[in-house]
Image (cartoon, coloured by chain):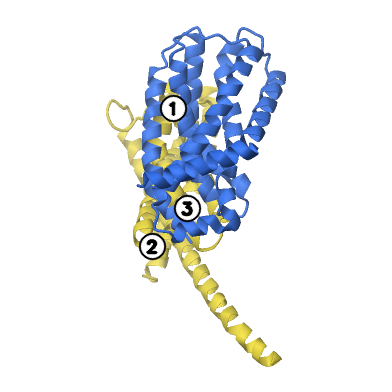
Amino acid sequence: MKRAFPILAVLTAVLLSYALYEALVVAPTDALQGDVYRIIYYHVPSAWTMFVFFAINFVASVVYLIKRNLKADAVAVSAAEIGVVFCTVVLVTGPIWARPVWGIWWTWDVRLTSTLVLWLIYVSYLTLRRFASGGNMPVLAAALAIFGALDMPLVYFSIWFFRTQHPQPVVGDGGSIDPRMFQVWLINWAAFLCFGMLVFWSRYRLEVTRRDVEQIQAMQSLAEPTRTSGALR
Amino acid sequence: MSKGLTRATLVKDLRLEWRSKDAINSMLFFALLVVVIFSFSFDPTAEESRQIAGGLVWVAFLFAAVVALNQTWGRELRNHVLDAYRVSPAPANALFLAKALGNFIFVSVLEAIMTPLFVVFYNLRALGPAYQLPVVAVLGTWALVVNGTFFAAMSVRTRNREVMLPLLLFPITIPALLAMVEATSAILTGELSAKFWIVLLGAYDVIFTIASLVLFELILHAE
């Protein structure tokens, strides 16, 4: 498994540079928006990657609650952190594009608002992890992750009924997009997904190592008092 | 689920509250402060105040409810009552239901007292079907307290107890809050139908009541 890490790293580097070239040079310029539209090659793949990681977080949380496997919890926290990073990228690149095209930085439209709420829910998840102490924290966090996942459809429907302005999805039925553009999208998605997985992997290993260190320290501190009390005697 | 435990805990909480009036007094005063402070932020007598009144009312209730919710489990930490619950074979659901019902009663009392004040201060009159308002109030209050009671049980386990509850509760409650505010505004202005929002609130209540009852045992027994 460890040998796969450098392979993934090299693959990510190659894919990212190829995707950058495709997005900035090869992809045709948009007929109406000009070059500014090219940010969607970062915006949309980041959003897809974000959903992948939040889905991993949800599955890992359920697995943790059923099996009580601490590795599942390490997967959950790593996935949530990477998901929040990609969600932040989505929330930042969106306004950069919206300003020249819509004329405004932000609007309280369904996709924007529900993405923001999603971000809030996962930031509160990470905050809970930060402030909950000791052994009960993974259980509390996993329960919150399930609540968040249950909440998302309700968030989406409620805000959808509230208002809508975001460009309709161009993938799927009725969309009109140059097939060349779509291809560049997929390449970028593959690149970002690989990058995300690479960071996720490092984060996961860090989390597992951190727990091992904690355990060793706990064992040592258990061993120490007997030694000192022996010396005192 | 044992009804006896639910009833016993509920009666105990109500009796404690009746004698001390801790939660209700702090909630009432807090909500009153919110009403007064809002009146400085928005012109309360303007005709448009009807448009924002739904938001004001529910935000005031939400903030005030957090005050009561924070006290839910703190009381059980003293003398290790919660630990006793944990080692007893009593079903966790019964305890949760008692706490949620208790909070529901406290927040309902608060709403019953505060609503006339809102009507007077903000010069409110429902232009739409007023009979829907109690439905919205019951569904909305339950949405707040069912999640609030659950997250209070979580936040009581964290280092920054009282601060943690709103941080957990507010993001998850956003759809319910939106539904309450929109339904109330729709009824007050009489321009739109509140049906969609009432159905959404009902769905929210069902989903999160089930989720809380299923997951509460895990939270209680997390050591």
Q: Position of residue A117 (x, y in %)?
A: 49, 36
Closer to the camera in the image, A9 or A210: A210
Residue drawn at (57%, 31%) of the image: B62
Residue drawn at (54%, 38%) of the image: B14
Residue ID for mark 3: A141
Q: Quadrant of the C terminus of chain A?
A: bottom right
Residue ID for mark 2: A68
Seen as rendered, the residue at the extreme left is A173
Q: Chain of mark 2?
A: A
Tell me the tag on residue B139: 1
Q: Is A194 situated left or right of A226 in this image?
A: left
Mark 3 neighbour class, 10 Å CA radius: few under 14, some 14 to 19, many 20 or more = many
In the figure, what tint was chain B given? blue
Labels 1 and 3 touching (C-beta < 8 A) = no
Kindly identify the amino acid type of the residue bearing the numbered disc 3: Ala
Labels 3 and 2 touching (C-beta < 8 A) = no
